[in-house]
Image: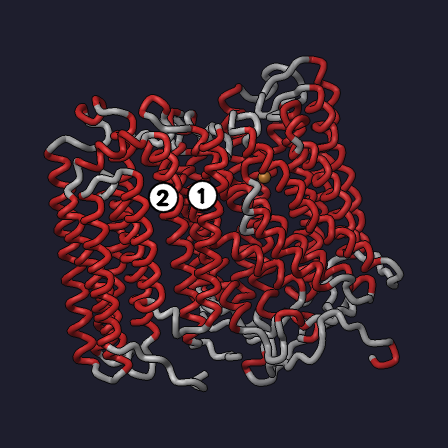
Amino acid sequence: MSHEFNDDVGKKMGMWIFIFTELFLFGGLFLVYAVFRANYTEGFHSAAADLDAFVGTLNTVILLASSATVAMSITAVQKGNNKLALRFIIVTVILALAFMVNKYFEWGHKFDLKLYPGSEIMEQLGKGEILFFGLYYMMTGLHALHVIIGVVLLMISYFKVKNGTVNSQKFIFLENSGLYWHLVDFIWIFLFPLMYLVT
Amino acid sequence: MEDKKHHISSFNSLLMVLIGLFIMTGISVMITEIHFSTFSVGVALLLASIKGYLVLTYFMHLKYDEPIFRIMVFLILLLFAIVIGITFIDYLLR
Amino acid sequence: MESTQATNHVSYLQHKPHKIGILNWILSTDHKRIGLLYLYSIMVFFIVAAFLGLLMRIEKFAPGETIMDAQTYNGVFTVHGIIMIFIIVIPGLAAVFGNFFLPILIGAKDVAFPKLNLFSWYIYIAGAILALISQFASGGAPDTGWTFYVPYSADSSTNVIWALTAAFILGFSSILTGLNFIVTIHRLRAPGMSWFRMPLFPWSIYATSWIQVLATPIVGITLLMVIAERTLNIGFFDPALGGDPILFQHLFWIYSHPAVYIMILPAMGVVTEIFPTFSQKPIFGYSAIALSSVAIAAVGYFVWGHHMFTTGISYWSRWFFSFLTFIVAVPSAIKVFNWISTMYGGSIDLKPPLLWAIGFIFLFMIGGLTGLVLGALATNVHVHDTTFVVAHFHYIIFGGMGFAFFAGLHYWFPKMFGKMYNIKLANISFIITFIGFNVLYFPLFIIGLQGMPRRYFDYFPEYQYGHVISTIGAFILIIGIFIMLFNFFRGARKGEIAPANPWKGVTLDWQIESPPTLLNFDEIPVITEKPYTFKKEEEA
Ligand SMILES: [Cu+2]
């Protein structure tokens, strides 16, 4: 058993526990989703048809790829190749930004169609549709917030790799940022079919 | 602390996992195109679970880390499933 | 006492790296100082919230408007609830004694993440200040009750958003503290301290921390949903838009029932430390107590629906929740039997900590047994939303958690401050508080059974006897508590110097100096036996 305060297993455990709380934070919304989907199956179907499955799929591919690249950056650091690791991190950040740009246009398009909570068009929709869009905005919005936090963590990791504080001996910070980034991916993996594929 | 060497995932294995994830994404999109309604959602969720499993195991390195992490993750997901189940005792039987 | 040895041998209270006094506190990452920061903040808020409680009791002294109107009364009971629940009892024992004694009891120098620990306190203070602002800001004090039930919380024109945000932020602090403690217990136990050689207070903190980590985010997202409901008109909980107010209650109680265990488990842990010491006997049923903490945490997560029996949830789910509620009483009862068995045949030393701990058992039993009245489907309907419920949870939360908190303070005070309080005065304050408590809350059981609803500022004349007795009890209680606080303040300022081990305890906290040095231990101890192993006199 270790008594060092820089105990890497302990830090990783801390990150995992934080991830659990994040899972339960989204879990509350998934629970709400499940209940309303059971109550308004039809409305959820027709509302989900308004979402662009292509954009959703594209974003899924982007996030999956970014998850792989951040894992590869850890491998590169562990092998002592910091330069390669930096490239992988940059690719990850670029993919994350691409995700956000997509999201921006997707939300923008919805707003152009006046599909947002409280709008006149929304109020004429059925109850299932209203709830679906409420959940859509809340869940993807909260997810986007996590993307931003993840990007910040990745940027910090970038500088730590660059100045050598993260190296082949000590890489827990990058590992933990990576874990957080995978969490963002993990949640999206479930959001994607529930939002875009229930048609 | 450094008693056993830290496992390093190879680039190849990570790439294979990514390809697997892409393929499953493709399948779930295609299945919903066929409009099986409830059935297709079930399959899409099943595929999502497999994808989640892959991410947890390989990307998040659970397979090679201390067993305690695997136990924790399993119990947490189980807990969430139970909470959903109990809530639905109310909603399905009302 | 005034050891002038190497700098690392100074007591934590004398260790002052900063010139400006306050910085030694607000920049300190020492778990002991952070524990005291929580203690002082909780004390201040406790006095505020207790004062609000007293105001409510005065209002109820006579039927009709006595000192405040109905709307003021709504605000007062809401803010009383929010402060008491989110700022005092939920962090309460875990943040004060958990911070101070968890590392010491497991033989560690600090918690796993000391900076995060200090950060949690800052978040806590931010949330607490926000809660206070909600009381005084222009919209008027929130009047929803601490439970924030929709649809009213989505409509009320008062400062509900402030209060919701405050609760959200306080929850975040609670999560980070829990996270810190879990990692601490997993990674920083002294060599040789296996799980089943760990004292029982850390066990209870471990179970508590998991609830904090896994239940709090649910209420966090729920509060965010209510905020979204108010600001964005989303409709999750609004039937007009297809939403479901009952769903809010599900989500809210998924957290808030386990939150009761966040409050009570560390309290059980504290008295579990006290009984062996004052009986000079090993704890009876060590593993049963350790595992019952975990069992309470696990089963307690699945009983939330017993708050919703009258809302129209399905028959089977009422059945299920009622059944599990009875099940979760079993591990609590196991603990009670073990505490009593620990005292049986021991050489009992009736010092103030033990008095408070016995008071805890007595009141907790009343609270627990009346809980079964509420957990049973048929009787629940009769007493639902009456003062019976109010009395029940004050017996559990104040009589349980509160009395255990005071027991812990009397137990560990000499260790924390290196000074002793006046034992005689402590006994007197216990007796007055105990009497005041029962006079205050017991009549509420009776008028509750007779039909007095909770949260009403007015009542029919036939309830006046109960209310008058209860209000008299409130004054007795306040006097008792002030005597206790006075005793502590006097003790801390000019009490006798306390020896390292005034109660002849055997756990690690009593093997180090009073007050502890900055790093607790000169040398990390190696654990070779179970905790609570009392040596015979001659060996000492
Ligand atoms: Cu409850």
Count up the numbered dots.
Answer: 2
Task: Name the quadrant of the C terminus of chain C.
Answer: bottom right
Task: Name the quadrant of the N terminus of chain C.
Answer: bottom right
Q: Nearer the viewer, residue A96 or B55?
A: B55
Residue at (57%, 71%) from the top-left corner?
A: C12
Q: Quadrant of residue C454?
A: top right
Residue A30, numbered label: 2
Q: Quadrant of residue C98?
A: bottom right
x and y percentages locating residue C195 in the rendered image:
62, 70
x and y percentages locating residue C122 in the rendered image:
43, 55
Q: Are marks 1 and 2 in contact (CB under 8 Å)?
A: yes
Q: Along the horizontal axis of the image, is C297 left or right of C421?
A: left
Q: Nearer the viewer, residue C499 or C373?
A: C373
Q: Along the horizontal axis of the image, is C24 left or right of C411?
A: left
| Residue bearing the label numbered 1 | B84
Q: Is residue C191 visible?
A: yes
Colour scheme of the rendered structure: secondary structure
Q: Along the horizontal axis of the image, is B21 left or right of C403?
A: left
Q: Label 1 sits on what residue type?
A: Ile
